[in-house]
Image: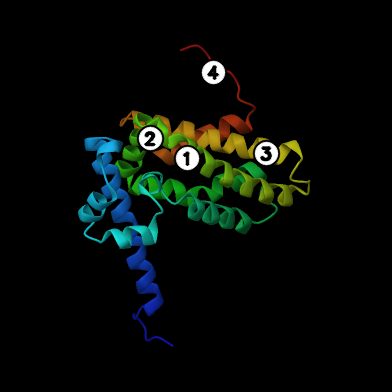
Amino acid sequence: MTSAGTEPASGRRDRRKRRTRAALAEAALRLVAERGLAQVTVDEISEAADVSPRTFFNYFACKDDALIGDQAREAKRLVARLAAVPPEVPVLAALRTALDEVVDEARAERELWCLRMDVVARNPVLLPRLLAGNAETERAIVEVVAARVGVDPDHGYPALVTAVTGAVLRTAMTRWAGQPDQPDLADLVDEAFAAVAAGLPQPGRA
């Protein structure tokens, strides 16, 4: 047992690892945004994060991985959150609930999220790796959605609703990142989900 207010050693280690991973990702993004992708090395990223190159490779296989984030880890977290939503909740509402943590993290680290979007947009060579990670995440979500609604994963519905959810999040994030005076990210995500749930009615003329 641990005494009240005492964090277990494993918890402290996990917290240090998260801080180190975040510091490396931030250093990579800032350096690449400043100098360009080809002009930044792993050694320079490590130095900026105050760790050794060996430590860098404990967290990321290469520079590109540090730039696009740990997609496998995020996929596992998202799938776990979706699976935890009570089965009676409709699929779209369940997916919106599962995205709460993603939205909260983006709001808390807006500058870094926007910087990542900008770095990827200005360095298209990163897109294949990003898209591959997104595809893995979508496949995992399709499995959970299929089980939730009681159909085979090859049924069209799970893949369609998963793809739509990805488009909803990307659209909201792009609007939020591109215009600082836009509403809160959570409101933009809610607005997009509501539009999808309503059948995407055509907006009236301004």
Cβ–Cβ under 8 Å for marks 3 and 4: no
* Residue at 62% in and 40% down: 162
Residue that mark 3 sits on: 159
Question: Which amino acid type is marked by label 4?
Answer: Pro
Q: Is residue 206 left or right of residue 114?
A: right
Question: Which amino acid type is marked by label 2?
Answer: Val
| Disc 3: CA contacts within 10 A as few (<14), some (14-19) or many (>=20) | some
Viewer-closest of 55 and 192 = 55
Across and down, in percent, residue 22 comes to 33, 55
Viewer-closest of 42 and 65 = 42
Q: For the residues carrying marks 3 and 4, which lies nearer the camera in this image?
A: 3
Residue that mark 1 sits on: 130
Residue that mark 4 sits on: 203
Residue that mark 2 sits on: 120
Q: Which sits earlier in the primary sequence, circle 3 or circle 4?
A: 3
| Disc 1: CA contacts within 10 A as few (<14), some (14-19) or many (>=20) | some
Question: Which amino acid type is marked by label 1?
Answer: Leu
